[in-house]
Image (cartoon, rainbow, N blue to C red):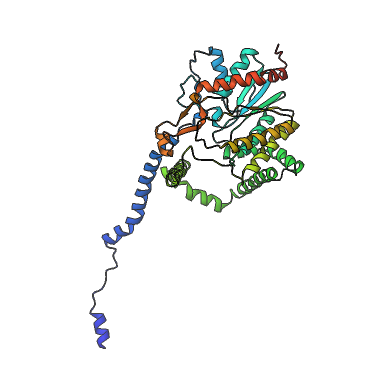
Amino acid sequence: MSDRAIEISDEPMMSTRAHPVIFLRRLYVPVATVVLVLLLGWWLVRTAEPLAGPPPEQRKETGANPELTPEEAKLARAVIEPGFASRGGREQLLFIGNSQTMAIPFGQPWDISTPQWFQVLLSRRAPGAVDVHCGSLGGLTMEETFFRVMDFEQSVSSPAAVIIAIHPELINRIGLREEVRQQAQEPASRTELRRLAASNPDLTLATRMIESVLKSDQAGQAGKETEATWPKRLENAVQSGPRTLLLFAQRELVLQLVNETFRKYRHRVFHIYSTSPRPLDESTYPENLEALELTLRYAQQKDIHTILYLGPLRPIQPNPDSPQVRARIRRDVMELARRYKVQCLDYTNLVPERYWTDYASDATHRLTGDAGQHDFAHIRAEAHKMVAEKLLEDVGDSILSQSGTSTH
């Protein structure tokens, strides 16, 4: 036997039995991963809790306001209920804008917003004449405004009216949240969108917006057709387990937290504050103007009485909206209103400085990094009534006359 063979035969035989230490080493990575995911999910969800509450524009309280009768408080509460079902009024009116029309900084449970005050004031002049419906959304975009107006028109009977509050933020950003997209993908809406895309070739950017919604709907329908196949069922079964973990079950909240955290530290690094200049985005502004024009054209075709108003802007300096930006928006919106024979009211200087405020130093605004900074978007409760009273003075008669109510 060779020396090499003898050397090999003298080596101790390795046991084939798994040693407990080796077994634990194999378990360490998956067990540690699960524990870390559980702990991370719990921490992230707890950290994001301030973002989980309803936004201020969705406040449902209409408590014992000393200025309202119990019946008026009930009317005000109905304005912000979801849907556009008639409450017996002879005319249906959609009041739509961003959170400025609904959010009330440091509000009390009995405070009510601009659309709610407008309903109360209209009812005082002509009970049962008009049902006001609030279609406002926080961070509303001009695209969403068009789809909300279309949904309103398809839900109510004539006569109908729309009041649209225009704010620089509304006309300076784009986006379509899922709840609005789903409304736009209802069968009746799809049919109407195809008609609009075919009959408005001059509005190329607005038509492109419509086509993108229709394409996403087709992709969703194709996904539903393949959902019943066994690979899709297997995928759903594999993914259903992790969804029970906080990190995955609350993923939308966690993603919002990540987005707000990124925004906060980006603003810190680049020294961006609420007073920092906010120029018009030239890549989105033309698209928003076309979306507004499509809205006005659609309302005209459907015989919807439409009123625009340029929302209040905070007069303090420095101001994120420069005089040049304000003048350009005013000029462009007024020109569209003139072209489509729509009344456009300029309320940009309506609300004095004392009716504005700063962001509260609460958990939500500390999380977003806005705490203590000037709030250039939202007005106090008294100013909501002020705007509604001005609207009643300027357009109340025309709205009530459409409902068949005498204004004399």
Q: Nearer the viewer, residue 408 or 12?
A: 408
The image quadrant that residue 152 belongs to is top right
List x then y, in percent, for residue 307. 67, 27
Which image quarter is the N terminus in? bottom left
Residue 112 can be seen in this image: no
Q: How many marks?
A: 0
Q: Residue furthest bottom?
A: 2
Residue in the picture at 52% in, 40% down: 277
Residue 62 in the image: above or below residue 362: above
The image quadrant that residue 119 belongs to is top right
Residue 18 can be seen in this image: yes
List x then y, in percent, for residue 341. 74, 29
List x then y, in percent, for residue 233. 54, 49
Residue in the picture at 52% in, 13% down: 67
Residue 172 in the image: above or below residue 310: below
List x then y, in percent, for residue 192. 72, 38
Which image quarter is the C terminus in? top right
Q: Is residue 248 left or right of residue 74?
A: left
Q: Nearer the viewer, residue 136 or 12?
A: 136
Q: Is residue 183 left or right of residue 59?
A: right
Q: Nearer the viewer, residue 379 or 61?
A: 379
Q: Is residue 352 left or right of residue 44?
A: right
